Amino acid sequence: MRKDKIIKEFRKYVSLSVLGMICLSAYILADTYFISVALGVYGLTALNISVAVFGILFGVGLMIGIGGAIQYSILKGERKDKEANSTFTHACLIGLLVSVVFSTIGIFFAGPLAATLGADETILPMAEAYMKVILGASPIIVFSNILTAFIRNDNNPKLAMAAMVTGSLSNIVLDWVFLFPLDMGMLGAALATVCSMILGVGVLSMHFITKRNKFSLCKCKIQIKKIANIIFLGSSAFINELSLSIALVTFNLIILSIEGNIGVAAYGVVANIAIIVMSIFGGVAQGIQPLLSKGQGLGDNNMIKLVLRYAIVLVFIMSIGIYALTFIFSHEIVAIFNSEANETLALLAGRGLRLYFIGFIFMGVNIIAAAFFSSIANAKIGLLISVLRGCIIIIPMALILSSAFEMTGIWLSFVLTELIVCAMALILIYNSASMSPASKFA
């Protein structure tokens, strides 16, 4: 593919994916803001415990969607249309099975799960209400991610973005309605999220109604190998989402012993602002995925290298700008979510933003590196990068540094984890680029 066409495709896919993911992150951000106003510090604490579960569920849907879409794009590039449709069918089957599991957990075990994640008697009813609705609506959340990924890879990134924007805007409106005029508390926040996602799926259905779809369900033999490949190819995307949830759970439990519920609320502010930044990097990663997978299917190594180079430069520039804005306006950002003007929360969250967000300078490269290797069907390296930053390094780092430096150690554990993984990711990318043309992207 010509360089000017690659740049044009890069701009289109990445810009639409980033915008869509920013809007998607507004689901949690809107919940954070409205809950902070309606329910105060305890509401924020309950949300911060509950949002880890939402992150895991969302990550599972993303794993199935991205993994299936990678396989779909490669097969389409190889002109294997029948196998491509079989991939979509298998992705839907996996989505159905995991939805049943998550829904069962939500209906019967939301309370014990909330308690296990650190909810005390004060916030347990709020956390349980939120988890029960979110997990109970698992099919909507999972299939929203599957359809978004496949439709984006089916040359319709505009519709995928439109669905995310529709869901985000409707969530803001519904959050206000359910939390204030209807006074439904945490239950209302969860219902707003689910209802807005239903509207988003309605928008995605236009891809099929207008008959633009080049993929569809088909009658095929269930292949365990194909299911395993979908999960494996999407595993790094899942771990990237899971990493925030793992950090949330780990940090919540540690912070409870250091600063109590107010400390968890402060971390909740930092973590939920961080979701926006992660969504930007995730949007770039999802935007380059169809292009990388297409290049893999066509055997176009030049296209793959150019897309990777543009993505790394882009996220690095973004990360510098984001950190500068966060550093300058940290107090103003915290004030938005501190409706009770709690001085302890303001101090902890303000310092947290300035320290924690240094890690995003390195995180962007890590997310792009994991997406790069997964998109060219080298999921082992993509998974390695994601697992290192998602749990293997950050958990012991948090335990060690928090014991020595308390809350400062919590913030720095994230920064050091991303720095270490970034160095390793750049080495892996360099080694990949140094391989012979025949084996470079195998």
Image: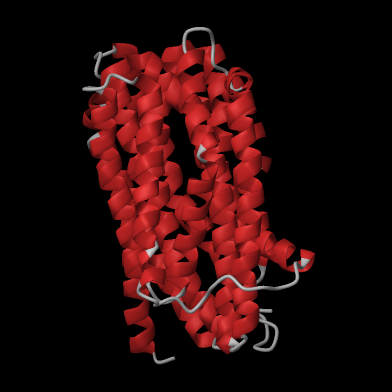
Horizontal and vertical percent position of residue 261: 46, 13
Q: Is residue 30 above or below residue 308?
A: above
Q: Is residue 418 visible?
A: no
Q: Residue furthest bottom?
A: 2
Q: How many marks?
A: 0
Residue drawn at x 35%, y 74% as measured from the top left: 210
Tell me where residue 254 sits by quadrant: top right
Judge from the rendering whether residue 169 lies leftward or rightward of residue 247; answer left or right.
Answer: left
Residue drawn at x 35%, y 20% as measured from the top left: 185
Horizontal and vertical percent position of residue 332: 21, 30
Q: Quadrant of the N terminus?
A: bottom left
Residue drawn at x 55%, y 62% as measured from the top left: 66
Q: Is residue 308 above or below residue 33?
A: below
Horizontal and vertical percent position of residue 390: 60, 44
Judge from the rendering whether residue 376 lies leftward or rightward of residue 358; answer left or right.
Answer: right
Q: Is residue 419 above or below residue 217?
A: above
Q: Residue furthest top?
A: 121
Q: Quadrant of the C terminus?
A: bottom right
* Depth check, front residue: 9 or 325: 9
Q: Is residue 292 visible?
A: yes
Horizontal and vertical percent position of residue 279: 40, 50
